[in-house]
């Protein structure tokens, strides 16, 4: 059997009039005439078969009948629940979803620790991050608003802005600076396992730049994701050839250290890419500008690390408790 409800519009008029005990003030709140309020109240009373108000005469206002006093709290509560949920639904519908395409390792090792700052500044925007390996054509097909790309920047199909350059240098767990074969000079690498990021610059190039000939550049395990290489290095399993942006937070936290001074530049960099159409979207532009600003902060830190000799950086990180993850 269907539940019988009174007409809902008159309930709104009843609640306002009952709260103010005045048809005039209810009409002002609801932006209708006093006659309209009186008509809606009469309609509700006829539907219910009860009198809700005592009309006290001109200038004397209203009082609720016993039935009206019992009915008003329930109506007020019900309308408040409807208003609350309607407002929540409206806020949810107003929320903008921003789809970001990012490389796996860059997303987990750099972007995520900083993303909260963007979200706090844009509470009406929900961010969705997708791995570039999974949706390689998402930007072209409109499945993503922004793509974080790694390369030379010579793309003709998108609008791309460089926001962070790439540098490469050895990193390791602090525990490898001590022990039977402490890392002091690049030649000491011959006593340690080399960890390889097979998708990035290899050890051979760095060892040649460091003029080290006593180390086999090919030995040691390889990984096809930079985050696995870095995790292995943090566990003390060997020395990794770290990519600056991806090891920056670990260096700041002290879970990794830079044992040697030599930093090798890379021709590759990180770019924020958008389609021509998406580039005019205000929220897309906001995220792009935020990403460029965050990249500039990280770039300054990487430049400082590059200018320091390896053990000076290690000593500073260990001595300065204020050095922590920028995220």
Image (cartoon, helix red, strand yellow):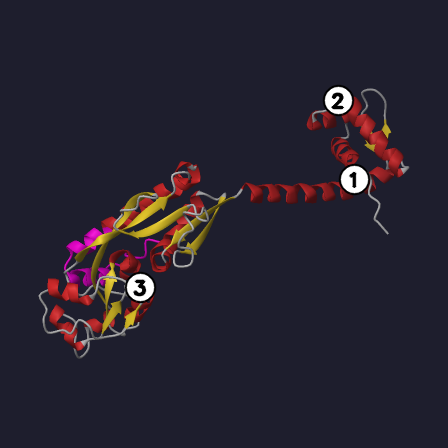
Where does residue 55 sit, x and y in percent of width and height? 85, 27
Which of pointers 2 and 1 indicates the residue nearer the eye? Answer: 2
55 inside magenta stretch: no
Q: Which residue is mark 3?
A: 226
| Residue displayed at 48% across by 44% down | 123
Q: What is the number of the mark on residue 280?
A: none
CA gap between label 2 and label 3 equals 70 Å
Calculate the distance from the C-alpha at mark 2 to the C-alpha at mark 1.
22 Å
The verdict on residue 315 being magenta is: yes
Residue under label 1: 72
Please indicate whether residue 108 sits to the left or right of residue 309 in the image.
Answer: right
Which of pointers 2 and 3 lies earlier in the amino acid sequence? Answer: 2
Q: Nearer the viewer, residue 55 or 78?
A: 78
Of badges 2 and 3, the one in the foreground is: 3
Secondary structure under the numbered disc 2 in the rendered image: loop
Count neighbours of disc 2 (C-alpha within 10 A) and say few if under 14, some if 14 to 19, many if 20 or more: some
User: Residue 96: image x %, image y %?
Assistant: 50, 43
Q: CA distance from mark 1 to mark 3?
A: 64 Å
Tell me the magenta residue range: 301-327
From the viewer's side, name the closer residue of 299 and 154.
Answer: 154
Residue beneath disc 2: 33
The reply to whether dot 2 and dot 3 touch (C-beta < 8 Å) is no
Q: Nearer the viewer, residue 128 or 45?
A: 128
Question: Is residue 311 shown above or below 75?
Answer: below
Q: Earlier in the sequence, mark 1 or mark 3?
A: 1
With 213 as the anchor, is 247 left or right in this view? right
Element carrying mark 3: helix
């Amino acid at each position: 059997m269907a539940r019988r409800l009174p007409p809902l519009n008159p309930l709104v008029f009843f609640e306002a009039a009952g709260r103010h005990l005045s048809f005039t003030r209810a009409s002002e709140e609801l932006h209708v005439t006093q006659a309209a309020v009186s008509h809606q109240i009469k309609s509700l009373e006829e539907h219910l078969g009860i009198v809700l108000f005592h009309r006290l005469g001109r200038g004397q206002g209203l009082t609720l009948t016993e039935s009206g006093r019992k009915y008003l709290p329930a109506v007020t509560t019900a309308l408040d629940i409807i208003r609350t949920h309607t407002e929540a639904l409206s806020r949810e519908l107003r929320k903008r979803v921003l789809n970001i395409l990012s490389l796996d390792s860059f997303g987990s090792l750099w972007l995520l620790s900083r993303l909260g700052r963007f979200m706090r500044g844009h509470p009406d925007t929900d961010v969705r991050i997708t791995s570039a390996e999974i949706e390689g054509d998402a930007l072209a097909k409109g499945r993503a608003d922004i793509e974080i790309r790694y390369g030379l920047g010579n793309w003709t199909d998108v609008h791309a802005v460089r926001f962070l350059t790439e540098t490469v240098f050895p990193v390791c767990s602090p525990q490898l600076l001590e022990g039977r074969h402490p890392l002091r000079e690049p030649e000491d690498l011959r006593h340690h396992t080399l960890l390889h990021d097979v998708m990035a610059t290899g050890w051979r190039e760095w060892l040649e730049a460091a003029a080290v000939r006593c180390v086999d550049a090919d030995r040691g395990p390889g990984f096809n994701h930079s985050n696995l290489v870095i995790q292995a290095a943090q566990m003390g399993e060997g020395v990794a050839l770290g990519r600056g942006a991806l090891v920056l937070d670990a260096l700041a936290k002290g879970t990794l250290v830079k044992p040697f001074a030599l930093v090798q530049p890379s021709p590759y960099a990180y770019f924020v890419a958008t389609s021509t159409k998406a580039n005019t979207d205000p929220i897309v532009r906001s995220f792009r500008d935020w990403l460029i600003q965050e990249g500039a902060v990280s770039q300054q830190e990487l430049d400082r690390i590059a200018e320091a000799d390896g053990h000076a950086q290690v000593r500073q990180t260990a001595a300065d408790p204020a050095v922590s993850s920028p995220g």
